[in-house]
Amino acid sequence: MGYVIKRYSNRKLYDTQESRYVTLEEIEEMIRAGREIAVVDAATGEDLTSVTLAQIILENERNRRAALPSAFLHQLIKYGDTWQDFVQKSMKSSLEGLVGSQREMDRVFREWAARSGWGPAPSARNERREEAPPAEGDLRDEVDLLRQKVKALEERLEKRK
């Protein structure tokens, strides 16, 4: 299970893993960082995750960071559950497609990098991909390694100039 955030009757949000109070903005940052968040009522244990995530979206809307069209929101309210089910399925499908495209782009980049001499051969990558997905720390290490290699290539180019 992901991060558990307890919501108290005074509307304060408490991160049980970090043992501290958090804001909606901090929860948004956690989600953007890839953490799974579960928000529960501290007294009843009721799942408040959807309500809290909707609140984050509405706060972004108020600050004009998201700008959902009014017509879309009207239709969502007007047609109720039927429309909401359709939107949820469509959004889920779109997000799955986006994630799939990102993975494919990553695969192509890795193959290109391997052919350019920046990383291991593609066959070694394919064997690794069959295992469980890499942990967040592994990805950070990999990104750091790629940055170092890019920097080294930039330095080589500068020397040639």
Image (tube, rainbow, N blue to C red):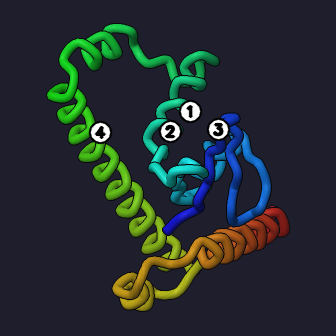
> Which residue type carries mark 3?
Ser
Does 38 appear above or below 149?
above
Q: Earlier in the sequence, mark 2 or mark 3?
A: 3
Q: CA distance from mark 4 to mark 3?
A: 32 Å
Q: CA distance from mark 2 to mark 3?
A: 18 Å
> Which residue type carries mark 1?
Ile
Q: Secondary structure at mark 3?
A: loop
* Residue placed under numbered mark 2 in the picture: 53
From the top left corner, tell me how far across and down residue 10 is, in percent. Answer: 70, 35
From the top left corner, tell me how far across and down residue 61 is, in percent. Answer: 54, 20
Q: Secondary structure at mark 2?
A: helix
Q: Are marks 2 and 3 in contact (CB under 8 Å)?
A: no
Question: Residue furthest toward the right?
Answer: 159
* Residue placed under numbered mark 4 in the picture: 91
* Residue placed under numbered mark 1 in the picture: 56
> Based on the displayed image, in which of its 4 quarters is residue 149 positioned?
bottom right
Q: Are marks 1 and 2 in contact (CB under 8 Å)?
A: yes
Camera sees residue 122: no
* Residue placed under numbered mark 3 in the picture: 9
> Which residue type carries mark 2?
Leu
Q: Are marks 4 and 1 in contact (CB under 8 Å)?
A: no
137 lies left or right of 67: right
Q: Secondary structure at mark 4?
A: helix
Question: Which dot marks residue 32?
Answer: none
